């Protein structure tokens, strides 16, 4: 497994303006993350995607360990148990809620934060 800074073309075009990180396995990119720098040692994790057939193999944890520095924020669907479990294992805690943040279906977002150690 290799985790490295990615190129904009290694994630969907809508994320090209952000810092991209990728995880490679078996000679191909199997997942990616988009991170936005907020300045002063803070960033926001915008999106993480792992190919479905490569999930639950530690790729997302390795990707996040490499990509995230300092204090990091994110929003996640309240019902997304898998993501909540992943984020908890890499040190995120719930710090708030955004009412009706998501559409289709409408759902609250939990705001999570991982503080710089």
Image (cartoon, rainbow, N blue to C red):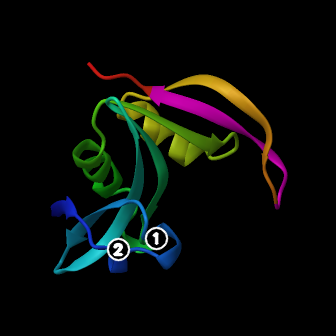
In the image, what residue occupies the spot 26% across and 68% down?
6
Q: Could you tell me how far apart the alpha carbons at marks 2 and 1 are, in whole angstroms?
A: 21 Å
The answer to which quarter of the image holds residue 76 is top right
- Location of the C terminus (image quadrant): top left
Q: Is residue 30 above or below residue 41?
A: below
Image: magenta residue range: 104-113
Local SS, label 2: helix
Q: Main secondary structure of the magenta part?
A: strand
The answer to which quarter of the image holds residue 56 is bottom left
Is residue 82 or residue 40 the one in the foreground?
40
The label number, if any, that marks residue 109 in the structure image: none
Labelled pair 2, 1 in contact (Cβ < 8 Å)? no
In the image, what residue occupies the spot 30% across and 30% down?
70
Across and down, in percent, residue 100 comes to 83, 42
In the image, what residue occupies the spot 63% across and 47% down?
80
Label 1: which residue?
A: 52
Reply yes or no: does residue 107 show up in magenta: yes
Closer to us: mark 2 or mark 1? 2
Across and down, in percent, residue 27 comes to 16, 81
Query: Going by the image, does 40 lie left or right of 79?
Result: left
Reply yes or no: does residue 13 show up in magenta: no
Label 2: which residue?
A: 8
């Amino acid at each position: 497994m290799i985790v490295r800074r990615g190129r904009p073309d290694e994630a969907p075009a809508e994320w090209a303006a952000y810092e991209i990180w990728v995880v490679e396995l078996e000679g191909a990119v199997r997942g990616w993350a988009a991170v936005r720098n907020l300045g002063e040692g803070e960033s926001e994790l915008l999106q993480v995607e792992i190919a479905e057939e490569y999930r639950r193999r530690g790729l997302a944890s390795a990707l996040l360990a490499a990509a995230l520095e300092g204090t990091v924020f994110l929003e996640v669907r309240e019902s997304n148990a898998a993501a909540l479990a992943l984020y908890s294992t890499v040190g995120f805690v719930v710090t708030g809620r955004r009412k009706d943040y998501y559409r289709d279906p409408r759902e609250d977002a939990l705001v999570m934060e991982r503080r710089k150690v």
